[in-house]
Image (tube, coloured by chain):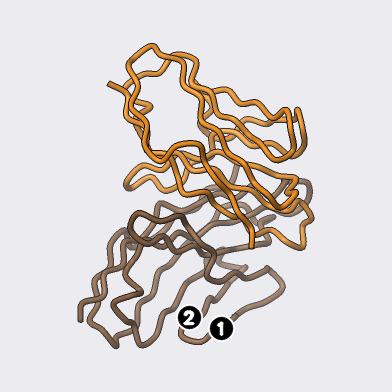
Chain colours: A brown, B orange
Amino acid sequence: GENVEQHPSTLSVQEGDSAVIKCTYSDSASNYFPWYKQELGKRPQLIIDIRSNVGEKKDQRIAVTLNKTAKHFSLHITETQPEDSAVYFCAAKKGGTSYGKLTFGQGTILTVHP
Amino acid sequence: DVKVTQSSRYLVKRTGEKVFLECVQDMDHENMFWYRQDPGLGLRLIYFSYDVKMKEKGDIPEGYSVSREKKERFSLILESASTNQTSMYLCASSFGASSTDTQYFGPGTRLTVL
């Protein structure tokens, strides 16, 4: 089955710096890669996603890049703010009849210091 | 707005008890999922369902069962709770069509087994 590895497990930055979280996946048939943000005590929520026919996607201060050949994708947050502090999860979904099943990475605890 | 609700936010049970966790979604989603979340391990899929009365094992189904008698409701059952099942349990749902893969999460149930 699919395996998703996420690094780093913790990331500490100063406000205004950039943050990058990287994930690798094992199944070349995976075609959908979402990123979820989970604030303390809250449910995970989708912040951005990318499909395998696209190399990069941006939404204001966040962007995701995908390298299908190397089977890795990354989340980039620019001009970080304290409210960006949360746990971030990457995930991958296989194409075909997978019933929307996602395989998640281990999570990255991002701390943004004011 | 999609709403996914879970029957309890906190639950304390004793070893050997039968435990029911319920999840309800109000968006007519086809797919529903149960995950457990443990620090450093990310979100691990226990079971999922792609239709009423249909279920599939996820990555860690041992010690759990599920029931989906109605489209909007997906129950997770611990037949005989054990201390290693102490965890945060998250339910999620998604539409079902491959073009809309977003999973929407419930608030989670923190289960403690004594």
Classify residue B108 by image quadrant: top left
Classify residue A31 by image quadrant: bottom right
Q: Is residue A101 above or below residue A112?
A: above
| Front in this rendered view, residue A69 or A75 | A75
Classify residue A57 by image quadrant: bottom right
Quick one: quadrant of the C terminus of chain B?
top left
| Front in this rendered view, residue B66 or A26 | B66
| Front in this rendered view, residue B51 or B39 | B51
Q: Is residue A46 above or below residue B59?
A: below
Residue B15 percent across, percent down from the top left:
33, 15
Residue plotted at (46% across, 53% down): A105
Residue B49 percent across, percent down from the top left:
69, 36
Q: Amino acid at mark 2?
A: Ile
- Left or right placement of residue B82 versus residue B31 in this view: left
Please report contact status of discs 2 and 1: CB closer than 8 Å, yes or no. yes
Name the residue carrying label 2: A62
Q: Amino acid at mark 1?
A: Lys
Residue A44 percent across, percent down from the top left:
47, 57
- Left or right placement of residue A15 versus residue B11 in this view: left
Residue plotted at (50% across, 15% down): B79
Residue plotted at (41% across, 80% down): A77
Q: Is residue B103 above or below residue B80?
A: below
Q: Secondary structure at mark 2?
A: strand
Crowd band around label 2 with a 10 angstrom C-alpha radius: few (<14), some (14–19), many (20+): some
- Left or right placement of residue B74 versus residue A89 in this view: right
Q: Is residue B33 above or below residue A71?
A: above
Quick one: quadrant of the N terminus of chain B?
bottom right
Q: Secondary structure at mark 1?
A: strand
Name the residue carrying label 1: A58
